[in-house]
């Protein structure tokens, strides 16, 4: 029995933000019915594939849709509409990720669903929200990051933006939507009323710049990565190349870390440089760059073992997932068929969520 046992969710979302939100609900006991078109969620066909259940399935799809039921409905047909109406009658939460206006044209906007289930919690996830000049503008994660200012500081040494390694706008929207839905569920227990949630990827991502875009937020110019403390302008929040052409990272700017490392390296004279403003630490950064090139990444891991410094080797995903920490924390869980799932990051004492089965397209409620 999970914390969300007894909560029924109708999920019309695809790809990443919505499915990420609803899989966290499914992991903790919610009954999630994934409503898919005839072709299924496009993530179903994304490579690579692995043995989840009786047949190989997309790793992406499996990790974001385990524990859900799949129902195929043509929402432009009368039978499809009638079936969705029946699902709405017992739903606590309704989630959709279409462009603004689509659900109204289909006859399942908030007002329509509320007429079926008065206390429904209805969540719309979109790129830019339901209103405004950008509401109908098509965009996935990187385009949202670009318009929100984030891509500009996701830049290389030459200052040119590069493709981001994490779909931050997608994930921010999923987490924001989950938080809002859970707040609404709590509120409903006292008010008896449902809610409508307009969750935009753009809006959800924007607060993530509070610590980096302070000058712009205050009405001034945009920060420049090379002179910003968390974006490359500080010696102790920096990536360094090693002797074997791999990399290590210093990830903590507290003066105690600077004191510990520079003392161990015999350069106490540079400690005060670490306290300077970002962009004024060139001498310190140059010393650290030269120093880190004198040993291999693994040699530095050994050297730092007894040093109290926020240091990490830069690992690829294969190396990271093979780290003992992953096993110790139980962060990879074997599912039916033997393939791995990334475990739910939400944990409660005494509860160990196990990955539910990955639904075959149109398997129905409870696989029927």
Image (cartoon, rainbow, N blue to C red):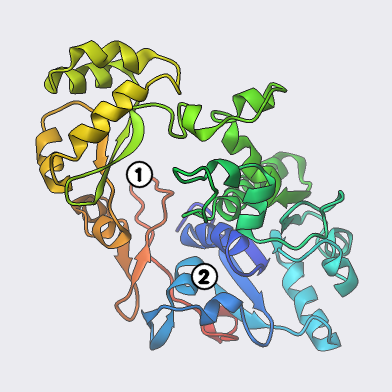
Look at the image and tell me whether residue 16 can be seen: yes
Label 2: state its secondary structure.
Answer: helix
Q: Which residue is mark 2?
A: 65
Front residue (pair 274, 57):
274
Quadrant housing residue 170: bottom right
Mark 1: few, some, or many residues within 10 Å (few <14, many ≥20)? few
For disc 1, the marked residue is 349
Q: In this picture, is 144 found above or below 299?
A: below
- In terms of sequence position, does the residue under pointer 2 or pointer 1 come before the other? 2
Q: Is residue 147 left or right of residue 58?
A: right
Residue at 52% from the left image edge and 62% from the top image edge = 23
User: Where's residue 247, x and y in %?
Assistant: 26, 46
Report helix, strand or loop for mark 1: loop
In this rendering, the count of numbered labels is 2
Does residue 141 appear to the left or right of 95 in the view shown?
A: left
Q: Residues within 10 Å of mark 2 (few under 14, many from 20)?
A: many
Q: Is residue 198 left or right of residue 142?
A: right
Q: Is residue 358 left or right of residue 320?
A: right
């Amino acid at each position: 029995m999970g914390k969300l046992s007894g909560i029924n969710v109708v999920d019309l979302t695809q790809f990443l933000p919505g499915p990420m939100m609803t899989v966290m609900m499914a992991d903790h006991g919610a009954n999630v019915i994934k409503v898919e078109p005839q072709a299924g969620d496009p993530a179903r066909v994304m490579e690579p594939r692995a043995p989840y259940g009786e047949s190989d399935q997309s790793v992406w799809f499996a990790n974001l849709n385990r524990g859900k039921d799949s129902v195929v409905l043509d929402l432009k047909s009368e039978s499809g509409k009638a079936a969705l109406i029946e699902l709405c009658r017992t739903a606590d939460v309704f989630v959709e990720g279409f462009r603004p206006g689509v659900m109204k044209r289909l006859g399942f906007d908030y007002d329509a669903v509320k007429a079926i289930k008065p206390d429904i919690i209805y969540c719309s996830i979109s790129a830019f929200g339901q209103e405004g000049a950008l509401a109908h503008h098509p965009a996935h994660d990187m385009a949202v990051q670009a318009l929100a200012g984030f891509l500009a500081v996701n830049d290389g040494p030459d200052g040119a933006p590069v493709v981001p390694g994490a779909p931050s706008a997608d994930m921010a929207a999923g987490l924001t939507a989950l938080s809002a839905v859970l707040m609404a569920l709590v509120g409903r227990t006292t008010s008896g009323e449902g809610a409508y949630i307009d969750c935009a990827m753009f809006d959800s991502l924007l607060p993530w710049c509070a610590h980096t875009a302070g000058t712009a937020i205050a009405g001034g110019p945009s920060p420049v990565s090379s002179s910003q403390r968390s974006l490359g302008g500080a010696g102790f929040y920096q990536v360094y190349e090693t002797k074997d052409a791999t990399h290590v990272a210093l990830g903590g700017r507290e003066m105690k870390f600077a004191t510990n490392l520079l003392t161990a390296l015999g350069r106490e004279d540079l400690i005060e440089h670490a306290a300077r403003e970002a962009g004024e630490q060139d001498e310190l950064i140059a010393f650290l760059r030269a120093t880190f090139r004198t040993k291999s990444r693994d040699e530095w891991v050994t050297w730092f073992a007894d040093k109290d410094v926020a240091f990490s080797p830069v690992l690829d995903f294969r190396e990271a997932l093979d780290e003992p920490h992953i096993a110790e924390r139980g962060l990879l869980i074997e599912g039916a068929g033997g393939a791995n799932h990334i475990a739910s990051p939400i944990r409660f004492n005494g509860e160990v969520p196990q990955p539910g089965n990955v639904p075959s397209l149109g398997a129905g409620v409870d696989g029927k």
